[in-house]
Image (cartoon, rainbow, N blue to C red):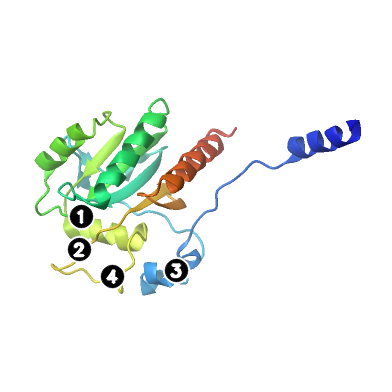
Amino acid sequence: MIFAVGVMGGYYLQKPEAKLPIINPSDLNPALVDDSLERTGLNHRIGDFSLLSQDSVLITQANLEGKIYVADFFFASCQTICVDMAKNMRLLQETFKNDPELVLVSHTVYPEKEGVGVMRAYADLQQVIPNKWYFLTGDKEQIYTLARKHYFAVMEPGATFNEHDFIHTDNFTLVDSKKRIRGMYVGTDDLEIQKLIADIKILLKEERGI
């Protein structure tokens, strides 16, 4: 028994810390990835953007410097999957409200109808903590390019933007402080959200060098 306890103790002492993968386009279902990116096996990063928040503040990657974040794509008038997505984003906000390194970033996919005023009202409805959860609106082509070519949040053929495009996805994407994708989750699934919470804790430890 003493030997067995010693062996088990040694295993847990030497067991390597869990670490999240770095996800690149070549790791994903090709249906999610634009043809121009399919063979990219290294160094994929979320590109820069310039969008307005619910507070009429211009938000870019500079505002996320040194942060990890969870991103999603929604629209405020949605009464189907977005209801559960918002509920789960509120859960993330509450769980990590004392961790300033983590923020939440939600992009409206209906920016032509959902400007800053709508984002402000929706943020209030979700009881948003200032500077913790951003609701972003702005140029539709920019938002849809982010969804398709940066976050791989939607399974659609091609990535050509036109006025009839409409993205409706329940994907949550976890991004590290180097703008690399570290996890992708179904934002309406409670088990997936629990995995996301666990993964955020792992990533926070990594970022803090613990």
**Secondary structure under the numbered disc 4 in the rendered image:** loop
Residue annotated with mark 1: 109
**Disc 1 and disc 2 in contact, CB within 8 angstroms:** yes
- Residue 19 place in picture, x, y as percent: 59, 46
- What residue is at 49 percent from the left and 57 percent from the top? 23
Q: CA distance from mark 1 to mark 2?
A: 7 Å
**Disc 1 and disc 3 in contact, CB within 8 angstroms:** no
196 lies left or right of 141 = right
Mark drawn on residue 152: none
Mark drawn on residue 29: 3
- What residue is at 24 percent from the left and 51 percent from the top? 74
Q: Quadrant of the N terminus?
A: top right
**Secondary structure under the numbered disc 3 in the rendered image:** loop
- Residue 152 place in picture, x, y as percent: 37, 61
Q: Quadrant of the C terminus?
A: top right
Res. 39 visible in picture: yes
Q: Nearer the viewer, residue 157 or 47?
A: 157
Residue lying farthest to the top in this orientation = 98
> Callout 4: few (<14), some (14-19), or many (20+) C-alpha neighbours within 10 Å?
some
**Secondary structure under the numbered disc 1 in the rendered image:** loop
**Disc 3 and disc 4 in contact, CB within 8 angstroms:** no
Residue annotated with mark 4: 159
1 or 4: tag closer to the N-terminus: 1
Residue annotated with mark 2: 166
Q: Nearer the viewer, mark 1 or mark 4?
A: 1
Instruction: Write down the quadrant of residue 104 in the picture.
Output: top left
Q: Callout 1, which amino acid?
A: Val
- What residue is at 41 percent from the left and 45 percent from the top? 190
